[in-house]
Amino acid sequence: MACDQWQSQLDAYLDGELPAESMRTIDRHLRTCSACAADALARVQLKRAIKTAGMRFTPSPQFRNRIQKKAGGARSRWSFGWAVATALAVLMVASLVSTYLGNRTLRQQHLYSELADLHVSTLASANPVDVVSSDRHTVKPWFQGKIPFTFNLPELQNTDFTLLGGRVTYLGQVPGAHLIYQIRKHQISVFLFPEDLVALTAKSNAAKEHSFNVETWTQDGLRYVMFGDVAPEDIHNLTALLKASARS
């Protein structure tokens, strides 16, 4: 159609988006073309209807305030919900940690109970040791090839302690050495295990329940655990001797 080029520009003309010269050219054409003029009028009426509808649904200031308050409340509820979720997550983590620590404590108490039982049963046995000797140079070599580690023994001359001997023992599936010392008429058990296979702490309710004094420490990759129904100072003195010998 001859007027297609004009009608394609009508919207831009009505919106005042054409250059001034083009605006004047289309204006002259509309004065002489009834078809394009009618089309332009229809477009003007459509634009006015759309604008009127837009004005009709423009929110009032009061409506805007209500929406903003509700949005603020939603943010508050979201913040509260997030705080609750965070608190629940913290409680869950705390519960898991508490369970883990509780289980670890139970495992350690179980290990201490096993060692206390080994101490009692060994001393009650007719043959408490497999290698009977007070000579550390005899006892230490006897363990070679029987356990997966080596250790040093202290020189006990000029002390109140006597080495009675030793035996191979097991804590679970972990092999270790069980040494027995005597002071006055009391026996002390000293257990040695690989540190990475036997995780214990210095606290032991199990030992106290058996009326034993207990001492434990790690040195040179080994876990030492000592049991005895002797005075705390005796445990302390033997511990010092063993620690010194491990360093030599």
Image (cartoon, helix red, strand yellow):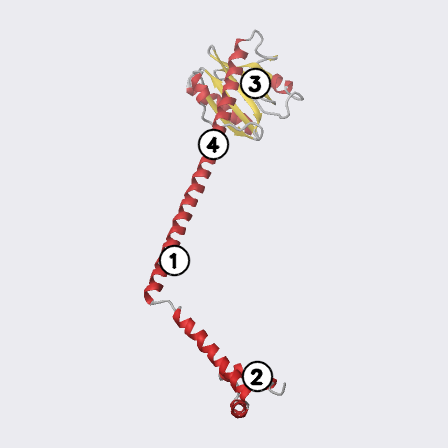
Percent of width and height locating residue 170 = 59, 20
Q: CA distance from mark 2 to mark 1?
A: 46 Å
Q: Earlier in the sequence, mark 2 or mark 4?
A: 2
104 or 64: which is nearer to us?
Answer: 64
Callout 4 crowding tier (Cα within 10 Å): few <14, some 14–19, many ≥20: few
Q: Amino acid at mark 4?
A: Thr
Label 1: which secondary element: helix
Mark 2 or mark 1: name the one nearer the start of the chain: 2
In the image, which disc is placed on residue 126?
Answer: none
Front position among marks 3 and 4: 4
Q: Amino acid at mark 1?
A: Ala
The residue under label 2 is 7
Measured in 3D between alpha carbons, the distance from the residue under mark 4 to the one under mark 1, in whole angstroms, is 41 Å
| Res 71 label | 1
Badge 1 density bin: few <14, some 14–19, many ≥20, Cα 10 Å: few
For badge 3, the amino acid type reads His
2 relative to 88 in the view: left or right: right
Which picture quadrant has residue 132? top right
Q: Toward the viewer: 126 or 42?
A: 42
Disc 3 target residue: 178
Of the two numbered discs 3 and 4 on the same chain, state the one appearing first in sequence: 4
Which of discs 3 and 1 lies nearer the camera? The answer is 1
Residue drawn at x 57%, y 14% is 165
Residue for point 45% across, 38% down: 92
- Eyeballing the image, is 232 above or below 9? above
Q: Position of residue 76 (x, y in %)?
A: 37, 53
Tell me the number on the disc at residue 99: 4
